[in-house]
Image: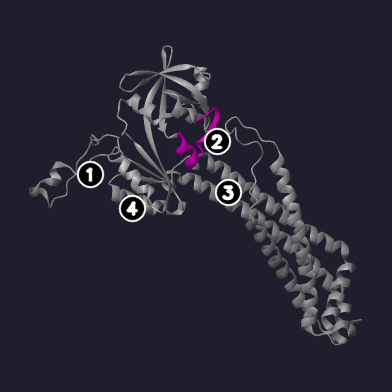
Amino acid sequence: MKQKHLIEIAVALMLARWKQTLVATIGVTFSIALFISLLGFMEGLNQLLDGLVLNRTPHIRLFNDIQPSKIQPIDLSEQYQNYHNFISSVKPVNTRKEIYNAQQIIHKLKNDKRVFGVAPKITAQVFYNLGNIDLNGIINGVDAEKEAKLFAFSDYVIKGNYRELETISNSIILGQGAADVMNAKIGDIITVTTTEGEQFSLKVIGFFQSGMAEIDKIQSFASLTTTQKLLGEDSNYISDIQIKLKDLNKAPALAIEFEDFFKINAEDIQTANAQFETGSGVRSIISYAVGITLLIVSGFGIYNILNMLIYEKMDTIAILKATGYAGNDVKKIFISISLSIGVAGALAGVFFGILLSAIIDAIPFSSPSIPNVTTYPIDYGIQYYLIAIIFAMVTTFLAGWMPAKKASKVDPVLIIRGK
């Protein structure tokens, strides 16, 4: 029965200052709605920007790197074993880019339970012949189906069918930037020259757009067989092995393991794209900081309103304590007011946050560099809603606890005697 009366008193006090109560609730609502929409938009933007590169990057890449020889002839001499040798102008080792025993390595990786998929790749440096002008280019020989499955290759082929790389002999999917420079159209025959001076004619079957203009001016794709012909190599020639893991976070450790086991260079995605992860982290920190600041500001608003309410309702508090209500009862009343504002503001804030996110998600967005994105990106992760609600409740509780503690210590005798 007593609890019922406490609730009734709290409701009466809120209604007595309903305008201030409404302002405090709107403050919490506004803060949570902006927190949710801001975090959702920023994380959606992070996923979009990182996806432009990270989705196209293997978690681990195996390759033969061109490096200076680690062991020099003097190191093999017993006479100088206990000496420190300083050698300058060390030249790279004359090694081939081909991965030896590539098929056996791929077979071994496919049977590894930590590996999601493996795709072979060949990189060939060429010149696109445009009359008397030669343009620098890189042709990536890929298995089109595996590339589409593991690295979203099909999402970036804006014209043509990527599967035709395997069915049409000597075909190529040009980067959109290179195609614009050459004024190439689907069905055209272009000529490329390898670094060895050999010329080949290739049929254009599609265009590729990664979202990075400088890359699209150089990069193109062909089948493994076509690229092997360009380089004059046999069907076993592979220069890169791309690995997609089931757990991205294991990439650094597994890269070291694979490098040691296969005796080949390995590069993990974190090392190759450290700048993108740093950028995403900074943007997320800024978004959380802004959102939390908004919630703290709304908490100060609630604190001020409850503080003023206590000063205005000193008579009421004194009467309550004089009629038998304890200090803890008074504290419960004001904390109930604060939490009521927090709950109402949180529920309204979640509703308007979802609504605002949906509005942003529906705004048209068009960029020639990102053809597969038509609206602004939004991430509807439930974690943003939970964080907003929990932080709002904690903020409003703390904002109400301090004035409530002050109200519980009011001496009714002094108040009534003063009147």
How far apart marks 2 and 4 lie (CA) works out to 32 Å
393 up-or-down from 101: above or below: below
Question: Circles 1 and 4: CB distance less than 8 Å?
Answer: no
Q: Amino acid at mark 3?
A: Arg
Q: Nearer the viewer, mark 3 or mark 2?
A: 2
Q: Nearer the viewer, mark 1 or mark 4?
A: 4
Magenta stretch, overall SS = helix
Which x, y percent locates residue 84? 17, 49
Q: Earlier in the sequence, mark 1 or mark 4?
A: 1
As drawn, the residue found furthest toward the top would be 132
Dot 4, how many residues are within 10 Å of its Cα: few (below 14), some (14-19), or many (20+)?
A: few
Helix, strand or loop status at disc 1:
loop
How far apart marks 1 and 2 lie (CA) works out to 42 Å
What stretch of residues is rendered in magenta?
Answer: 144-162
Queried whether the magenta region covers residue 158, the answer comes back as: yes
Q: Earlier in the sequence, mark 2 or mark 4?
A: 2
Tell whether 24 sits left or right of 183.
right
Residue annotated with mark 4: 257
Residue 287 visible: yes
Residue annotated with mark 2: 155
Q: Earlier in the sequence, mark 1 or mark 2?
A: 1
Residue annotated with mark 1: 70
Q: Earlier in the sequence, mark 3 or mark 2?
A: 2
How far apart marks 3 and 2 lie (CA) works out to 26 Å
The residue closer to the viewer here, 389 or 286, is 389
